[in-house]
Amino acid sequence: MQTSQRLDQQQAAERRRRELLEAADRVVLRDGPEASMNAIAAEAGITKPILYRHFGDKNGLYRALAQRHTDALLVTLRTALDTPGARRERVEATLDAYLAAIEARPQVYRFLMHPTEAETAPDSEKGFDVGRHTAPLLRRLGEELAKIIAERLDLGPNSEELARVWGHGIVGMMHAAGDWWLGERPCSRAQLVRHLADLLWGRLAAAGDIPGGPGL
Amino acid sequence: MQTSQRLDQQQAAERRRRELLEAADRVVLRDGPEASMNAIAAEAGITKPILYRHFGDKNGLYRALAQRHTDALLVTLRTALDTPGARRERVEATLDAYLAAIEARPQVYRFLMHPTEAETAPDSEKGFDVGRHTAPLLRRLGEELAKIIAERLDLGPNSEELARVWGHGIVGMMHAAGDWWLGERPCSRAQLVRHLADLLWGRLAAAGDIPGGPGL
DNA sequence: ACACGGTGTTACTAACGGTAACACCAGTCT
DNA sequence: AGACTGGTGTTACCGTTAGTAACACCGTGT
């Protein structure tokens, strides 16, 4: 009967796809984001055309690969955001969870931040597909955070819009500071978290000018 | 006399270099950051090896190109930061200046955000040169902002460290929100500026929970 | 016996960054 | 004059990459 065979083949294909993804994962973990398709195919014990049959092109493979890691990170962050305690503690827990993740697995982080070229959506107009220069991971984090902010905070009118701006803004802040911190290690993670939370808590607005200067 | 000839040749070389950079600029403005060395050479009316003699490699050319634009942007932002008025007005003026710049010249923006591979500093240790995933432009903006914050604000002990975290964090927030905004255009620039300033002014901390929800 | 759909291969293309080897053309030194 | 030097420019190549066409094999259903 052909239907059950179809199912068998389909689930076999999916199993194969997972195997290939795991092989790709190993290579990317070893060689970084510039791992070549040849290298990945070799690690999987096959040759290039099979990869292309399964994933279309390099971006397809990388997107599939990124989604797994992104999902995992999102779970971690969501549980951090549900930490019991005051809002400040939740925010600090979330910042710390993100930073701990990128600190623990720098190669994965490096891969996830790679600009995966973003599937070249059909160029409506003559648009220079501008505005896609943050990694898909950060886009997703921003949207998720926006959703949570809009769900849980009372922001008055325009709350939808405000929440999205804040979501992407906070994620960008976290990312940029984390990236810089990871490269220079100028302080402990806990201190970085505290500094960032201070920033979000309006300490920039509250700080006093240095006497005699031009002021800020 | 050979010294004056040396000078002639040197200044001729620099003029040539500027010409090449301008040609490269035209190509990048037309083709985006993935402009090939061949295309740039053709636009300049010459062939590849000359480009390589002048700039070493592709990153050399791109760094030289990026520096000009980055310098120009920095001047704009510095004058915005010296706007007369209250701190909030200065911050809003600076955010707006950045957003106006990326809005006005998206191709330049797109080029500047391209990860120029960052001159592969001598790999001390076996380091995976992690923590270099923000464009050089953003690094520089972050450092400059940190300097200004440290100079003008009274932040108590640790002010140096705090200022740098904030500098990079704020720049990252601005960039991520700006990139998202440029892609989706969900609101006016002025409104985006206000939302971001609200975030920096601690409205996240001050907002009330939505009644009945899990809270944030 | 035969077509079909899947897996796998080899061998190729086109483009890229980068380089070696050579040609030309000014002035300079002997 | 003739050799040397330092710059500009070229053609023709290398190695690697993403991506593809064409073919071979094998189990299954008709």
Image (tube, coloured by chain):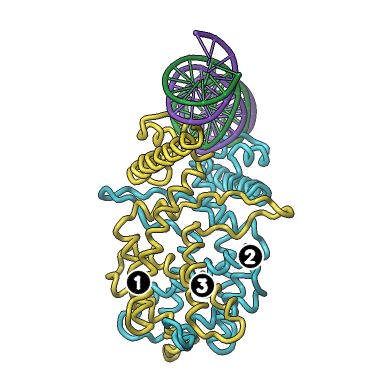
Chain colours: A cyan, B yellow, C green, D purple
Viewer-nearest residue: B208 or B104: B104
List the residue tagged with mark 1.
B80
Residue A74 found in image quarter = bottom right
Query: Marks 3 and 2: same chain?
Result: no
Q: Answer yes or no: do the residues labelled 3 and 2 have beta carbons within 8 Å?
A: no
Q: Residue furthest left?
A: A125
Q: Residue at x 59, y 40 (%)?
A: A36
Q: Answer yes or no: do the residues labelled 1 and 3 have beta carbons within 8 Å?
A: no
Q: Residue furthest right?
A: B125
Q: Is residue A176 visible?
A: yes
List the residue tagged with mark 3.
B146
Question: The residue marked by circle 3 belongs to what chain?
Answer: B
Q: Residue at x 40, y 79 (%)?
A: A150
Judge left or right: residue A158 versus residue A190.
left
List the residue tagged with mark 2.
A184
Q: Residues within 10 Å of mark 1 (few under 14, many from 20)?
A: many
Query: Marks 1 and 3: same chain?
Result: yes
Question: The residue marked by circle 1 belongs to what chain?
Answer: B
Q: Residue at x 38, y 74 (%)?
A: B81
Q: Residues within 10 Å of mark 3 (few under 14, many from 20)?
A: many
- Image: D8 above or below B204: above
Residue B5 position, x and y percent, is 46, 34
